[in-house]
Amino acid sequence: MDTNDSLRVASLWHSMHAISQQLSPTVGCSGIELLEADTFDLHCFQSLTGTKFFVVSEPGTQHMEALLKVIYELYTDYVLKNPFYEMEMPIRCELFDLNLSQAVQKDRVALLGR
Amino acid sequence: MQFFGGSDVSPSPPAPTAAGHNANVMYMFNRNGVCLFYREWNRPLRTLNPQQDYKLMFGLLFSLKSLTAKMDPTSADRGNLGVPQLPGQGCSFHSFRTNTYKLSFMESPSGIKIILVTDPRTGDLREALKYIYSLYVEYVAKNPLYDPGTPIRCDFFNTNLDQYVRSIS
């Protein structure tokens, strides 16, 4: 999947997230948190500013919310606090990528241990 | 061929007593986007008028299916986003959850889509949706007076559905 496709998927997700709030039968809906498909699960986390993080995982994986919160912290540390990062631009910060792979790796090890 | 149902799907009068029903709302669409059936048991908030609500729901499902087909990590070649998929082709989602509701979805090979909106703590409803589809086949598809592609007005279907929904956990 190339960059253009990623952008299309991300913008489609953003709209779907908003529409799902409209269709709620009760008040106070904050959008899709988990989408279960045949071959994967998609977990989504929305920060207070509306930035959405989503993770695609094997069906039935637990504890993805914790991983998403960790990723959010990494985002604030390595991306937002980076003086050269322009808001709303694609993220190209080495430290962010590095720490992200480490966090996912750690989570995978912890998952096997559980 | 009728698209999006010009005629009114008169929502059947809300089932008496919301208490005891475990689902909130149910929709059924055919492959052209006509809303065949809509029933609500517990819906305090209604943001749009019925016709817009059905179109929005259908549109949401169409786009989500397209998104899941594209995002599928197991299949090697995926079509481009927005390419219409046949029922059963490509990976399809079966439910999504928000903090206030859980939506379960099933599409039959003939394109009949069944949607059930329930409490977020509800478990996997795939078997329940299959059973509801079998109720549809029994009481609607086999009904000689039913005209396919038009809204469903079969009393047996309504009563059996209400009974079944009461028993979903």
Image (tube, coloured by chain):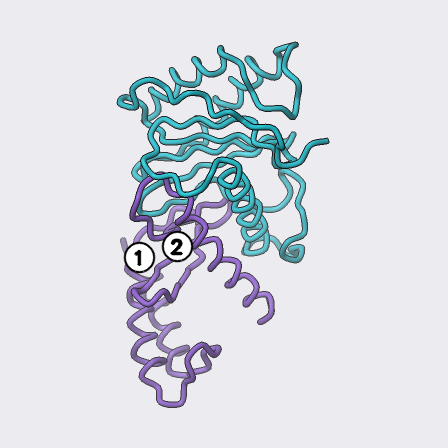
Chain colours: A purple, B cyan
Answer left or right for A62 relative to B116: left
> What residue is at 30 percent from the left and 54 percent from the top?
A63
Callout 1 environment at 10 Å: few (<14), some (14 to 19), or many (20+)?
some
Callout 2 environment at 10 Å: few (<14), some (14 to 19), or many (20+)?
many
User: Which residue ends up furthest to the right in the rendered image?
Assistant: B1
Quarter occupied by residue B71 = bottom right
Residue B94 in sight here = yes
Q: Quadrant of the N terminus of chain B?
A: top right
Write down the chain letter for disc 2.
A
| Residue type highlighted by circle 1 | Glu
Q: Quadrant of the C terminus of chain B?
A: top left
Write down the chain letter for disc 1.
A
Residue bearing the label numbered 2: A43
Instruction: Tell me the distance, in whole angstroms, between the alpha carbons under discs 1 and 2.
Output: 7 Å
> What residue is at 42 percent from the left and 60 percent from the top?
A55
| Residue type highlighted by circle 2 | His
Q: Nearer the viewer, residue B87 or A60?
A: B87
> What residue is at 49 percent from the left and 31 percent from the top?
B27
User: Which residue ends up furthest to the bottom in the rendered image?
Assistant: A84
Residue bearing the label numbered 1: A65
- Where does residue B118 sit, x and y in percent of width and height? 36, 34
Answer left or right for B159 relative to A11: left
Q: Is residue B116 above or below residue A55?
A: above
